[in-house]
Image (cartoon, rainbow, N blue to C red):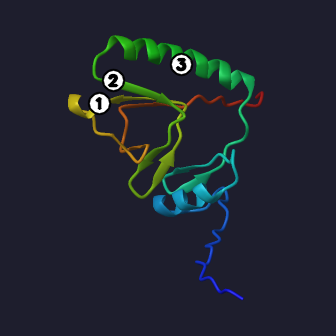
Amino acid sequence: MSTVDRPERKILPPLVAGQRLDQPTFHERYAAMPPHTRAELVGGVVYMPSPLGYEHGELYDRVATVLTTYRRRVPGLSGAGNATTKFPLSGEVQPDRQLRILPEYGGRSRIVGGFVVGPPELIVEVARSIWPDA
């Protein structure tokens, strides 16, 4: 019989809405979650949004059109939709849209390991609040 040393697999606890985590711990647990899991870390708190409906998609499309048109006309800008954006220690969000000023034009964010690191100049989150009738 052959013996092979195998590294012990690290089993991470799942993310839970409302948990308080630092950004590195959140990212490690998020990467271990099942595919299609959506979660964000805002101010050190885990948020797990519900599925998106048609109305959200329609508004997202309008925002994307406006920002893409603007970006194409202004030099030194880069834009993305649903791109993970890491903030030191307390945040990792995936905003609906964002615009960045490129570093060579004075922007503060960078692309590191395929992720935006640091604050983009504009983040847009499409949301709708329904207020009960008074």
Residue 37: x and y in percent read: 68, 48
Q: Quadrant of residue 118?
A: top left
Residue 50: x and y in percent read: 72, 41
Quadrant the C terminus occupies: top right
The residues bearing labels 3 and 2 have C-alpha atoms spaced at a distance of 16 Å
Viewer-proximal residue, 45 or 76?
A: 76
Under mark 2, the amino acid is Leu
Under circle 2, the secondary element is strand
Residue contact between numbered discs 2 and 1, judged by CB atoms under 8 Å: yes
Say left or right for 56 vs 74: right
Q: From what the image shows, is residue 93 above or below residue 57?
A: below
Say left or right for 53 vs 76: right
Residue 94: x and y in percent read: 53, 40
Residue 29: x and y in percent read: 59, 61
Q: Which residue corresponds to mark 1?
A: 102
Under circle 3, the secondary element is helix
Which residue corresponds to the image point at 38% horizontal and 13% vertical from the top-left?
Answer: 72
Task: Tell me the mark number nearer the camera, choosing from 1 and 3.
Answer: 1
Q: Which is nearer the N-term, disc 1 or disc 3?
A: 3
Q: Which residue corresponds to mark 3?
A: 63
Q: Quadrant of residue 75?
A: top left
Q: Which is nearer the N-term, disc 2 or disc 1?
A: 2
Under circle 1, the secondary element is loop
Q: Which residue corresponds to mark 2?
A: 77
Under mark 3, the amino acid is Val
Q: Which is nearer the N-term, disc 3 or disc 2?
A: 3
Which residue corresponds to the image point at 47% horizontal and 58% vertical from the top-left?
Answer: 23
Say left or right for 71 vs 66: left
Which residue corresponds to the image point at 44% horizontal and 44% vertical from the top-left?
Answer: 115
Q: From what the image shows, is residue 67 above or below residue 1?
A: above
